[in-house]
Image (tube, rainbow, N blue to C red):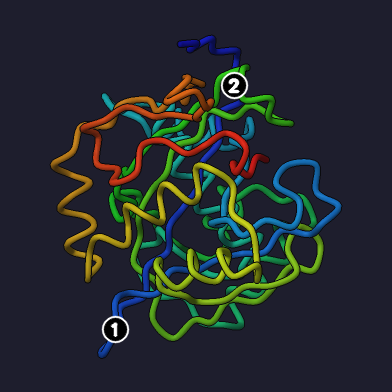
Amino acid sequence: MSRNVGEGRPAATVVIVREMTASPPHILMMERAAHMAFAGGALVFPGGAVDEADRTLAAAMAKDGDVDDLAARIAAIRETLEESGLGVGFRTPIASAQLMDMRAALARGESLAAIAEAHGLEFALDQLVPFSRWHPAAAEHVTRIFDTRFYLVRAPRDQEPRVDATENVRLFWSGARETIARCDAGQGRIIFPTRRNLERLALFDSFDAMAAHASSTPIEMVRPWIEDRAGEPHLCIPENIGYPVTSEPLGGVQRG
């Protein structure tokens, strides 16, 4: 068994959950552009690396809080706005025209802190519910190593996502089981962490159930390792941290 862990760049991913009346919740999925160095062409949740401006804002907001966690939440909010045009993690609803202005300001290089101040917006970081944290091992041979915190958040009302046409080429709402089935049918691909998290999300029929499960399950760093099982190498994750599937034959694993 190998669990060698290299240094990972801090990152954040947000699972945006939209309640449905006659089916399990839908989750916003993003198809990354094929040319992207990490997970090119894969279906993922919105997210990306934590930058210095995120950490600066987190440090300014922190009292006794975890600056690393706050910075990841801020990155999740910023990346969601950049990649989908949705405004999550704000105290009050935001109109579509305002969101377009904010997204354009981010594209010009303005900081999220300055944009929020200019629009008179207050952050609501508590709306993001910690769900998991993943850090791949060097043995996985992934193209980039990120220390990624996953958060759950309700989809904002009266907002629809729009592709950014640079990092992503498609955005769509889909149930967790439906997305897995789509990929199993060859209509998309999902990397190992995304598949495991979708399998876990598929266990629940509402955002409240997902959030309650997340709040009651201690977040242990998920560091996959390669292990021989019945003569075949598997990529494995720990048992008893909420995941219904904890290993997959290495030959079938989709990597970043």
Where's residue 1, x and y in %?
45, 11
Where's residue 206, x and y in %?
22, 70
Pair 1/2: label in front = 1
10 Å neighbourhood of mark 1: few (<14), some, or many (≥20)? few
10 Å neighbourhood of mark 2: few (<14), some, or many (≥20)? some
Q: Secondary structure at mark 2?
A: loop
Q: Residue at x 34, y 44 (%)?
A: 245
Q: Which residue is mark 1?
A: 23
Where's residue 7, x and y in %?
60, 14
Quadrant of the rendered image containing residue 238: top left
Q: Does residue 169 lie above or below 116 as drawn?
A: below
Does any portion of residue 223 appear in the rendered image? Answer: no
Q: Which residue is mark 2?
A: 8
Number of disc labels: 2
Q: Residue at x 55, y 71 (%)?
A: 182
User: In front: 158, or 188?
Assistant: 188
Residue type of the residue flagged with mark 1: Ser
Where's residue 175, x and y in %?
40, 73
Q: Residue at x 59, y 70 (%)?
A: 185
User: In front: 72, or 182?
Assistant: 182
Distance from label 1 to label 2 (Cα)? 37 Å
Does any portion of residue 227 appear in the rendered image? Answer: yes
